[in-house]
Image (spheres, helix red, strand yellow):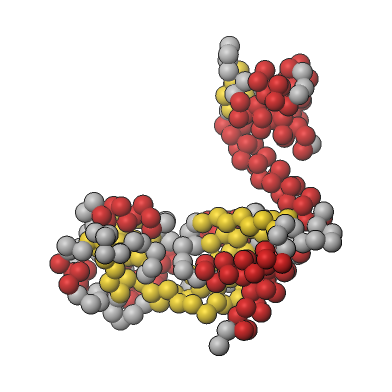
Amino acid sequence: MELRVLRYFLSVAREGNITRAAERLFVTQPTLSKQLRELEEELGCRLFERGARAIALTEEGRLLRVRAEEILGLAERARAEIAEREALGGELAIAAGETPAMRILARAARMLRAEHPALCLTLHSGNAEDVADRLARGLADFGLLLEPCDLARYAFLRLPWHDEWGLLLRKDHPLAAKAAIAPADLRGLPLLTSRQARVEAEFTGWLGHPLGALNLVGTYNLIHNAALLVEEGLGCAFALAHLADVSPASPLAFRPLTPALRAGAVLVWERDRHPSRAAQAFLATLRAQLAAQP
């Protein structure tokens, strides 16, 4: 399976039309059609449903589209890393959960780019499962996770930051008058919670009983849209501090939990994968930055 043919396939998938794709690729339509037929023969399946004016991907075609984008992305990264030579360039890819600890990495990235302006940062935001998936597939050099998390397969660096869990609620909610939220305050309260298993385990320990015993009305993976649900009155949300807008102009408030429940931030990378020069330079810059802090 050649990279050139995968590029042809992706162009047709995006255009939904062989003629337009051929024009964009600067090849003839018969040549492009022949390449697609040979690709289908090689894979032993149909990739397209061909109509009179347009074509659509089959289920196998949709799967190949995802994998082809990953393969070509990795090929481009490899090409950029090999071409670095004298000047450090290419891509530095970070997958991160939502946490203000990202500011620590941002400072290191700014310092590194000041020395190597050809370096390009790619940031993907997601929950812990998203981060682990991108690391496993080689689509990220580093992942930023919140503890507790499984570190067995990773090399890692703990960052000097702890996030605080609390309750995101409307300012006109009765519990907004409290300085902190205790487990007893949650009885019967409609709640939104992160769908990550590690978070459920944390809250089970804090509550003293399974999270499922609460009145759960929904789950979320990133807090931004969950905050809109809270704002509209669907319920309150377990959330980390400093992520949702709780400014004076916002209708929302954040109240910490009592006893306090905190999560440490940790930078991870695949233990068995050789890091790129950009990744090595970033890690060295980050370590120097942390060592210089009081």
- Residue 93, position as x, y percentages in the image: 64, 58
Residue 211 horizontal side relative to residue 286, left or right: left
- The quadrant of the rendering that contains the C terminus is bottom right
| Residue toward you, 129 or 276 | 276
| Quadrant of the frame with the N terminus | top right
Give the residue at the far top of this rendering: 52
Please state the horizontal and vertical placement of residue 52, each as a whole percent of the image.
58, 11
Q: Residue at x 65, y 20 (%)?
A: 20
Relative depth, front residue between 221 and 88: 88
Asked if one can make out residue 75 in the rendered structure from this viewpoint, the answer is yes
Q: Which of 41 and 89 is in front in this view?
A: 89
80 to 166, vertically: above or below: above
Q: Residue furthest right?
A: 85
* Residue drawn at 36 percent across, 52 percent down: 225
Location of residue 291 in the rendering, given as x and y in whole percent from the top left corner: 63, 84
x and y percent of residue 174 in the render? 15, 67
Total marks in image: 0
Most extreme residue toward the bottom, as rendered? 294
Q: Is residue 212 above or below residue 3?
A: below
Up the image or down, 91 lies above or below 36; here it is below
Residue 212 visible in this rendered orientation of the protein? no
Q: In this view, does 80 lie to the left or right of 187?
A: right
**Residue at 60%, 80% in the rendered image:** 290
Up-down relation of residue 24 to residue 180 (above or below): above
